[in-house]
Amino acid sequence: MYPFQYQRATTPEQAVAAVAKVSGAAFVAGGTSQLDLMKEDVLRPSLLVDVSPLPLKTISAFEGGLRLGAGVSNTAAAIHPEVQARYPAVSEALLAGASTQIRNMASMGGNPLQRTRCPYFRDPAQPCNKREPGTGCAALKGLNRVHAIFGASTACVATHPSDLAVALAALDAQVQVTGPGGTRTIAFPDLHRLPGDTPQQDTTLVPGELITSIDLPSFTGRSHYLKVRERASYAFALVSCAVALEMDGKKIRRARVALGGVAHKPWRVPAAEALLAGKKPSEKLFRAATEVAFADAKPLEHNAYKLTMGRNLMLRALLETSGLQPLQGPAGTAFAASVGGVGGE
Amino acid sequence: MPDELQPLLPTGATVPNCELPDGTRLHELRGQPVVLAFASIDWNPAQVYQSEIFTRLLQEFDAGISSLEARTTTWHSLDWHSEAATQLGVTGQRALLLLDEQGVLRWQTTVTPGQEIRPGQVLAALEALRPPMSVTGEAPAAAGGVSRRTFLTATLAASALLLLVGASTAAEPVAATKNHPPMLPTPPADTVPITLTINGKTHRLEVEPRVALLDALRENLHLTGTKKGCDHGQCGACTVHLDGQSALSCLTLAVMGEGRQITTIEGLAQGDDLHPVQAAFVKHDAFQCGYCTPGQIMAAAALVQDKQKRSAAEIREAMSGNLCRCAAYPNIIAAIQETQTA
């Protein structure tokens, strides 16, 4: 690991100023993904500003919803009674991700900012436009089994790895940030960006901007997260799906669907959401929605399986969220979220 | 951290007339730039693949010039014990050297063992050799630069000679371009004084900020009960408690452990009285080689604190961050089940 300077933040404003004024500076919170990448020589920050001591560790009521401080651990958020009861998709996404130790360490602000798991990004000997702009994309013609089927570019076909981000995109969470230019609110679906010609930028945050909280809006519907992975536990999603359904009697008033493991950002499917609105839940309707959602998917050489897997997963997520099919485990647990069972069951 | 590597041949020097593996002598290649890359000749798929990457970078760098015929580049993998390697002073590491048309060493990089030559370094080197474009769009072969066209023609035609030896960080700073920051030698690291509270006891030590808590525990404080397995947060062998919760010491900076209550396996028993989880592991023979055991026990001890009764499936899910190469899992589950209901 390359040497770096270390500072402990005292206030969000001080942390922002410290990072903004030093080239190559970064925040560190849980550090679970960041330190791993630094050990791999993928990241070489000049300065780490430790935001873990900041008083951003509370979960509080906020405008009819919940405000999750950026420093709240993934574990604390996942098991919070209000999150469990009102936003089970968030608990399910968190608990189906990582391991107990990592969830204890990882923060709500850091989780959505983790970098891609593209193996070429994580190997400094490989060309990668995200790691070293201009060197090319090794995945494009390499092994691209785990890569994107939506929104990719010739510069980058990486996917975003966060489970939490997919649930937050479906719930239209809001991200509060403070930065060199003051504070602002970002709609969660706008936090991440598509790779285009500048895949080195994962998000729309500017240098020095710090996430201070994730706000969950008032929501009275049902939400659910479903994930397919290669092991029973402790693995990243091949494909995942978060659904937020609000009903009006027996009809769907509003449906929001986000797909994970398929794009450079959590992939909302507005055409499918529009198709679902105002209709009565049925398997036929849901199947039609999956067809619409995947209509413009563009598979690479090794990942065409994600179209079938993704449609099937989205169908199942819609069936389970609407109650047409039972959950695989108690709502708000890893068991509800995991396709194929967990823990060797 | 390895010492900074010092190339024996300074940039700007004329290279000796070494013999290359195909019998060519370097002086015969005067008039065209040459890329030399050194690596071990041991069969190594990663190196073979990396050679292909370098080839592609050279070819893609040429993408804007249509008049060049595509030619097959021949790569020579050379033993770093070779005469050429010795004369160029690159023995013992992987190295990449660029020579200009006059046979002058223009750029070089060597890497410390265990590291790779980064594609960005190759690209930065190529960019550094590219002369500024004139208004006509033609690249003049300036004295200080190499004509891009000549360079590439020669490279592709006369074979980009890749003598690979080992792998690398930069030794010689390369001119920075917009997208490629200069590859600087490792700067000297400063240590910082920290105070850690471990197993109820206060320890003062001086560490670099990059030192992981795991290494501080083992190397500075000689608390070697906490094990280093993967060192990347995948195996759980390094599990400790931070403020009562299980955490990975390999992915925690020691400097970030200040002000927190750190508990290691050494602090779990009360004197000769084993922690209930420790006793249950002994009773159920919940280990074979024992290497993952401190991590398993720390994870399990944190898990049973809430006195919740978990099913075997729930325990497996909660313990999925702790791998056991000997697969003592059934006994580990049994030990935890007994402890949580005790």
Image (cartoon, coloured by chain):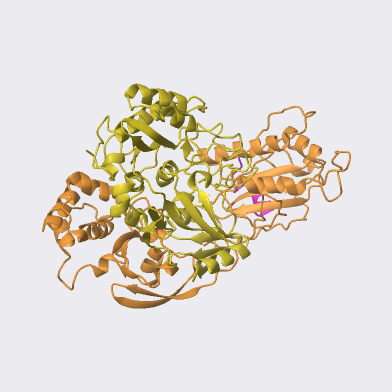
Compared with A278, B223 (above or below) is below
At x 27%, y 45%, the residue is A333
Boundaries of the magenta span:
B77-90
Quadrant containing the C terminus of chain B is bottom left
Residue lying at the far right of the rendered structure: B136
Residue B179 x, y percent position in the rendering: 67, 49
Chain whose colour in the figure is yellow? A
Residue B234 or residue B58, whichever sits in front: B234
Q: In which quarter of the image is residue B190?
A: bottom right
At x 69%, y 34%, the residue is B59
At x 59%, y 35%, the residue is A153
B4 drawn magenta: no
Q: Can residue B15 be seen in this view?
A: no
> Hue of chain B?
orange
B84 drawn magenta: yes
Q: Quadrant of residue B220?
A: bottom left
Residue A197 x, y percent position in the rendering: 64, 40
Quick check: B322 left or right of A277? left
Compared with A267, B116 (above or below) is below
How many numbered dots are placed on residues in this image? Answer: 0
Compared with B13, A166 (above or below) is above
Residue B85 or residue A233, whichever sits in front: A233
Residue lying at the far front of the rendered structure: A249
Residue B37 or residue B266, whichever sits in front: B266
Residue B230 x, y percent position in the rendering: 38, 52
Compared with B335, B204 (above or below) is below
Quick check: A52 left or right of A18? left
Q: Can residue B70 be seen in this view?
A: yes
Residue B55 x, y percent position in the rendering: 65, 36
